[in-house]
């Protein structure tokens, strides 16, 4: 898939402009977005992604459009799992809810920059060494097993990395968050606030998630343009999705299972592609292995079905658990004064 330089330029300028506008809106009026506001923004970004995919259909045909949609849905699903850890980080650092929009947006911008570097390196490796798909496939299968074993993230899943510990130790910093600013003047001396540590935590944590998601999307497409744009569209609406989902995150109990199924599927797909283009001497004498090819339409259908099933099953279980709790409370009856 050849992407002219001017399309790269227009895409980067357009996406950067959207992020700048988003940042200015948040900086101008810090607030906790309502459900209606969050829904409108999420719908806006989802619509943009759908329209972008249709544009790819017109320029490069249905195959590459399907790769974009499959990659975007995969990254979007994995990004929802990121939100669990974002909630833990916000709680750990006691970030006031009114300032969480700004922290999230800047953290996401940092993540985009780092993912861009990661994607560039990944594309260069994939282009030169086809055998790396064996490693990617095995890694995704291991990650899928880890998702099933560990379940949904909890407080124990977040550990401060070396960069966070270094920033705490080296940067002159105030003791607590007093406002949305990254620095404050205290006794005539300008100090950083813990906000800077929170943003570093969000950005670097998302980069760790990229270790799973970038190999996954390279299993769906080898186009750096599709990999990059799918990641950008998946992350752009993440801030609003954080506030929209809210307590619903706790109800998505089968999200990890759905993600595990998707990652395992893509892992198998990567191994099959590596076998199809095999040049490793100790596998079939270095010759390609005739294995089934999984078309992109089947990948897209499988991803939608897996995540849709996980979401519906989660909500059904949550509703049944609530009804069971209500029935249990009714059976127990009110607590009498004598029993207290």
Image (cartoon, rainbow, N blue to C red):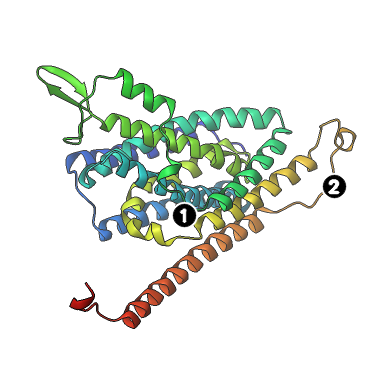
Is disc 2 surrounded by few (<14), some (14 to 19) or many (20+) residues within 10 Å?
few
Of 297 and 206, nearer the camera is 206
Residue at 90 percent across and 34 percent down: it is: 285
Residue 75 drawn at (x, y percent): 51, 47
> Going by the image, does 162 lie left or right of 4?
left
State the residue at coordinates (66%, 58%): 298
The residue at which mark 1 appears reads as 50
User: Residue 290 got which mark?
Assistant: 2
Residue 207 image offset from top left, x and y in percent: 47, 35
Mark 1 crowd level (few <14, some 14–19, many ≥20, 10 Å Cα): some
| Residue positioned 49% across, 68% down in the render | 312
Depth order, front residue of 43/265: 265
Q: Residue lying furthest left in this view?
A: 187
Residue 214 image point, x, y percent: 56, 39
Of helix, strand and loop, which one carries label 1? helix
Q: Earlier in the sequence, mark 1 or mark 2?
A: 1
Residue 201 in view (yes/no): yes
Which residue does the image show at 81% across and 32% down from the upper left? 280
Q: Which quadrant of the rendered structure holds the N terminus?
A: top right
Q: Which mark is residue 113?
A: none
* Gap between marks 1 and 2 measured at Cα: 35 Å
């Amino acid at each position: 898939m050849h992407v002219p330089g001017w399309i790269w330029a227009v895409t980067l300028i357009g996406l950067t402009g959207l992020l700048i506008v988003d940042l200015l809106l948040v900086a101008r009026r810090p607030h906790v977005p309502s459900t209606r506001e969050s829904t409108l923004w999420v719908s806006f970004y989802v619509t943009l992604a759908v329209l972008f995919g249709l544009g790819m259909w017109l320029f490069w045909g249905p195959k590459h459009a399907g790769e974009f949609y499959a990659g975007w849905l995969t990254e979007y699903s994995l990004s929802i799992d990121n939100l669990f850890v974002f909630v833990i980080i916000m709680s750990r650092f006691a970030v006031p809810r009114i300032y969480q929009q700004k922290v999230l947006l800047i953290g996401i911008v940092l993540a985009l920059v780092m993912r861009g570097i990661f994607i560039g390196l990944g594309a260069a490796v994939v282009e030169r060494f086809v055998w790396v798909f064996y490693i990617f496939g095995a890694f995704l299968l291991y990650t899928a097993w880890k998702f099933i074993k560990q379940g949904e993230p909890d407080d124990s899943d977040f550990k401060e990395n070396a960069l966070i510990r270094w920033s705490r130790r080296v940067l002159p910093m105030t003791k607590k968050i007093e406002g949305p600013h990254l620095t404050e003047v205290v006794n005539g001396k300008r100090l950083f606030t813990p906000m800077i540590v929170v943003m570093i935590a969000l950005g670097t944590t998302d980069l760790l998630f990229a270790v799973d998601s970038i190999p996954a999307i390279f299993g769906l497409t080898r186009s750096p343009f599709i990999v990059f744009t799918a990641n950008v569209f998946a992350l752009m609406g993440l801030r609003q999705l954080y506030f929209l989902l809210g307590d619903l995150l706790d109800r998505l109990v089968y999200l990890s299972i759905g993600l595990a199924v998707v990652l395992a599927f893509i892992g198998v797909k990567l191994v099959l592609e590596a076998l199809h283009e095999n040049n490793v001497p100790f596998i079939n004498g270095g010759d390609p292995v005739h294995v089934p090819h999984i078309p992109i339409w089947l990948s897209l259908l499988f991803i939608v079905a897996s995540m849709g099933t996980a979401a519906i099953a989660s909500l059904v279980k949550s509703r049944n658990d609530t009804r069971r709790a209500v029935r249990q409370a009714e059976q127990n009856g009110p607590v009498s004064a004598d029993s207290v």
